[in-house]
Image (cartoon, helix red, strand yellow):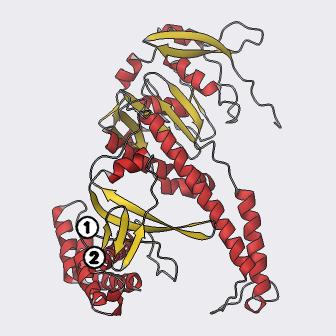
C-alpha cells in the first residue's frame, strides 16, 4: 500500500513538472552543460520530485495504523524504491513503473543496523518479530560475511517450487570473500561478446566458445505448459471469450482453478531454475576471465539493440547481465575494466593495415589483401581489443606483435568450428604472407591438404603441433 501510494504521488509530481515552463526551457538548453543540469535540478525542487521529498510524503504512513506494522526507516526505504523506479522512467531507462498487487512485494530493508530491521546474535529482530537464522558454520563465505560489520539488513522472499522461502541478506562493510582457487591474473584480456558466443584472448590463451553452452533450453517445456495454461484458463472462464475464441473486451472477472495455479507455479519454477543456472555459469565465466588478466578490454555495446534482433538468444543467455557481473567482481578484485565505444574502433570491420571493410553477419572470417587472415572474426576482434588505447586502435602496436598470432587464433576456433556452422576458413595466399615477413605456415602437407597448427605458449616458449581441421559442412547437413 505504501509503495503504490508513493508511486502514484511521484508520477503525479513528474507529470506536473514536465508540463511546467521551467522544465521545457531546460530541455532546450545544450546537453552536458552545467546550465542544463542546474535548470533540471531547479524544476525538480520546485515540484518536489526528489528522494527526500518523497520521504516527507511517506511520513504520514508512520502516524497511521500502518505505523504499528512498519518502522519509519523501512517506510523511507520503500519510498526510495518508488522514487528510483519513477526516476529511471523519467530519464528513459525503464518503462513506466507498475503498481504492485497482493503478494508482489518480495523484499523489505532498513537504513541502518541500529533501528528498524536488526541483526543481533544470528537472529533478525523487527518490532515484535524474532526470526532465528539457519546458518551453515562450515561455509567460508558466510563465515567471512558474519565477521564483517553489518550496515543494514534486507528480508527477501523467494518462491521455490511454489512455496515461500525467506532469506536474510546482510549488507556488510569491507571486501567480499575470494576463494583461493579464484586468483587474479596479470596482463591484458580482450573480450568480444556476442548474442550467443564469447571470445577471450590474453597473452597465454585464446578461447572461442558458445556463451552459457551448459545451459539447457527449456523452450519446448515452457511452450507446452503455456498452451496447457491457456486451455485451463479458457475452460474455467468461457464467459470471457467470444465464439471465435478471441477474448471479450472490457473488464472481466477470472476464475483460476487449483490445477491452473499448479501449472503456473511449474512455469515459474522452470524460469527460476534457468535463471539460477545462468547466474552460476556467469560467475564461473567471470572467474575464468579474471584469472587471465587484471585489465579487461571490451566494446561498449547496446544490449537493447541486441534484444531487437536476437531476442531469444539474448533473453536466454543474458550477455548484459554477464557484463554487469564482470564489472562488479572486477572492482572487488582490484581489476580494471576498459569499455570503449565502437564508433571509432569498429574492431569487426577494421584490419591491421588500417582498411575498413563492412562485413555482413554471415561472414564469420576476416581476411584482407594485405595478408592478414583468414581468422575467425570474433577472435580477431577480441585480439584487437587488447591494443585499444584511449578509445583508438593502436594499429602499429598490433602489427608489431601479429607474427604467429593468426595460428594461435585459428587453433582456438578449430575446436568449435563445426558446431558453429562456419565451415573451413578460406585458403590464404602464402606468397603475400611471406612478403609481409610473417613466419607462419598455414597449410601443411597431408592427404587432404588441410591441417592446422595448435599453438601453446608455456613459460614463454611457443610450441606447435598439428591438428586435423574439421571438414566443412556439405549442402543439406
Q: Which mark is residue 253?
A: none
The residue under the point 25% across, 62% down is 31
Residue 369 in sight here: no
Q: Where 361 sits versus 447, above or below?
A: below
Q: Left of 245 or right of it: where is 168?
A: left
Label 1 sits on residue: 112
Label 2 sits on residue: 73
The residue under the point 71% across, 57% down is 219
* Quarter of the figure with residue 150: bottom left
Badges 1 and 2: C-beta atoms under 8 Å apart?
Answer: yes
Q: Which one is in front, 215 or 426? A: 215
Query: Which corner quadrant holds the N terminus?
Result: bottom left
Q: Position of residue 320 (x, y in %)?
A: 48, 51
Query: Which corner quadrant holds the C terminus?
Result: top right
Q: Which one is in front, 188 or 404? A: 188
Q: Which one is in front, 370 or 383? A: 383
Q: Which callout, 1 or 2, points at the residue further toward the start of the chain?
A: 2
Amino acid at each position: 500500500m505504501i509503495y503504490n501510494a508513493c508511486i502514484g504521488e511521484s508520477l503525479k509530481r513528474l507529470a506536473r513538472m514536465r508540463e511546467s515552463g521551467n522544465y521545457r526551457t531546460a530541455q532546450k538548453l545544450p546537453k552536458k552543460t552545467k546550465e542544463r543540469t542546474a535548470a533540471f535540478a531547479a524544476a525538480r525542487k520546485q515540484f518536489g520530485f526528489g528522494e527526500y521529498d518523497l520521504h516527507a510524503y511517506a511520513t504520514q504512513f508512520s502516524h497511521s495504523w500502518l505505523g504499528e506494522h512498519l518502522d519509519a526507516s523501512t517506510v523511507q526505504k520503500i519510498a526510495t524504491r518508488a522514487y528510483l523506479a519513477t526516476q529511471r522512467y523519467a530519464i528513459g531507462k525503464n518503462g513506466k513503473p507498475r503498481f504492485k498487487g497482493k503478494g508482489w512485494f518480495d523484499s523489505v530493508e532498513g537504513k541502518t543496523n541500529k533501528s528498524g530491521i536488526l541483526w543481533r546474535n544470528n537472529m533478525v529482530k523487527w518490532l515484535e518479530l524474532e526470526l532465528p537464522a539457519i546458518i551453515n558454520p562450515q561455509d567460508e563465505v558466510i563465515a567471512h560475511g558474519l565477521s564483517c560489520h553489518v550496515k543494514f539488513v534486507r528480508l527477501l522472499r523467494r518462491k521455490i517450487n511454489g512455496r515461500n522461502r525467506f532469506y536474510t541478506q546482510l549488507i556488510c562493510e569491507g571486501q567480499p570473500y575470494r576463494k583461493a582457487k579464484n586468483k587474479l591474473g596479470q596482463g591484458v584480456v580482450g573480450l568480444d561478446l556476442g548474442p550467443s558466443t564469447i571470445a577471450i584472448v590474453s597473452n597465454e590463451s585464446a578461447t572461442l566458445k558458445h556463451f552459457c553452452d551448459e545451459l539447457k533450453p527449456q523452450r519446448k517445456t515452457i511452450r507446452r505448459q503455456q498452451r496447457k495454461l491457456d486451455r485451463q484458463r479458457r475452460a474455467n472462464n468461457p464467459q470471457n471469450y467470444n465464439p471465435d475464441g478471441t477474448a471479450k473486451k472490457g473488464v472481466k472477472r477470472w476464475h483460476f482453478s487449483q490445477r491452473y495455479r499448479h501449472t503456473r507455479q511449474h512455469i515459474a519454477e522452470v524460469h527460476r531454475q534457468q535463471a539460477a543456472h545462468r547466474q552460476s555459469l556467469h560467475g564461473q565465466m567471470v572467474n575464468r576471465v579474471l584469472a587471465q588478466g587484471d585489465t579487461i578490454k571490451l566494446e561498449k555495446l547496446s544490449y537493447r539493440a541486441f534484444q531487437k534482433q536476437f531476442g531469444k538468444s539474448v533473453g536466454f543467455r543474458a550477455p548484459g547481465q554477464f557484463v554487469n557481473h564482470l564489472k562488479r567482481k572486477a572492482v572487488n578484485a582490484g581489476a580494471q575494466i576498459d569499455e570503449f565505444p565502437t564508433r571509432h574502433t569498429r574492431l569487426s570491420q577494421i584490419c591491421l593495415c588500417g582498411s575498413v571493410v563492412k562485413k555482413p553477419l554471415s561472414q564469420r572470417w576476416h581476411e584482407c589483401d594485405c595478408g592478414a587472415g583468414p581468422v575467425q572474426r570474433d577472435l580477431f576482434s577480441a585480439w584487437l581489443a587488447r591494443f585499444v588505447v584511449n578509445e583508438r586502435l593502436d594499429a602499429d602496436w598490433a602489427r608489431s606483435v601479429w607474427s604467429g598470432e593468426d595460428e594461435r587464433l585459428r587453433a582456438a576456433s578449430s575446436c568449435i568450428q563445426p558446431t558453429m556452422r562456419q565451415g573451413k576458413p578460406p585458403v590464404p595466399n602464402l606468397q603475400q604472407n611471406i612478403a609481409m615477413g610473417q613466419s607462419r605456415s598455414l597449410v601443411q602437407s597431408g592427404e587432404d591438404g588441410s591441417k592446422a597448427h595448435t599453438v601453446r605458449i608455456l613459460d614463454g616458449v611457443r610450441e606447435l603441433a598439428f591438428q586435423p581441421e574439421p571438414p566443412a559442412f556439405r549442402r543439406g547437413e
